[in-house]
Image: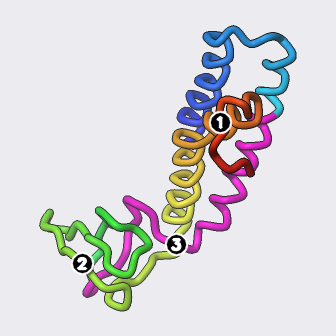
């Protein structure tokens, strides 16, 4: 997770360098990067209670991996023999609460947010005129 987070933060600063930001804009970008990395950690801590893509669950006594539709009412699971169980109802699968599973959920949430949304959220703060027509939060 730390290596991916380092790459995502480096990408934010490469964006700043490539777009020709001033030093003041770079300082603002550093501030918003810290805010949004903290926001990602907060959101990930709240989302630990839900399974994520790649989470391990128990299904019919076997240890399976969530393959698709994580945290939905009907998820697809990869069984130990390599086959896929499609549309498994939530009441037939049981979440695991091991430290490794909790770490997986947390790190998945942080890397997903920083990899997919952080640059856009920072640019919305720095260049609101470029995002006219969208709702600002």
Residue 94, horizontal then vertical, whole percent: 40, 83
State the quadrant of the N terminus. Answer: top right
Assign the magenta stretch its main secondary structure. helix
Residue 114, horizontal then vertical, whole percent: 59, 41
The 10 Å Cα crowd at callout 3, few under 14, some 14 to 19, many 20 or more, is some
Q: Which circle's residue, 3 or 2, is located before the other in the chain?
A: 3
Q: CA distance from mark 3 to mark 2?
A: 17 Å
Find residue 47 and report its image quarter.
bottom right
For label 1, the residue is: 131
Find residue 124 and report its image quarter.
top right
Q: Which residues are magenta?
A: 32-61
Helix, strand or loop for disc 1: helix
Residue 58, horizontal then vertical, whole percent: 34, 79
Q: Residue at x 80, y 10 (%)?
A: 22
Colour option used:
rainbow
Q: Circles 1 and 2: CB distance less than 8 Å?
A: no
Q: Circles 1 and 3: CB distance less than 8 Å?
A: no
* Viewer-nearest of discs 1 and 3: 1
The 10 Å Cα crowd at callout 1, few under 14, some 14 to 19, many 20 or more, is few
For label 3, the residue is: 50
Residue 129, horizontal then vertical, whole percent: 72, 31
Residue 87: image tag: 2
Q: Residue at x 52, y 72 (%)?
A: 50
Q: Residue at x 50, y 57 (%)?
A: 104
Q: CA distance from mark 1 to mark 2?
A: 38 Å
Q: CA distance from mark 1 to mark 3?
A: 32 Å
């Amino acid at each position: 997770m730390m290596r991916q987070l380092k790459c995502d933060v480096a990408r934010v600063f490469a964006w700043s360098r490539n777009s020709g930001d001033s030093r003041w804009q770079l300082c603002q970008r550093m501030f918003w990067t810290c805010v949004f990395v903290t926001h990602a950690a907060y959101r990930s801590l709240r989302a630990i209670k839900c399974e994520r893509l790649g989470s391990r669950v128990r299904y019919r006594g076997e240890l399976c991996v969530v393959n698709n539709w994580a945290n939905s009412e009907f998820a697809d699971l990869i069984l130990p023999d390599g086959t896929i169980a499609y549309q498994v109802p939530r009441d037939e699968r049981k979440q695991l609460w091991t430290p490794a599973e909790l770490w997986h959920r947390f790190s998945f949430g942080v890397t997903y947010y920083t990899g997919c949304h952080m640059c856009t959220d920072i640019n919305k703060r720095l260049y609101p005129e470029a995002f006219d027509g969208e709702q600002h939060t």
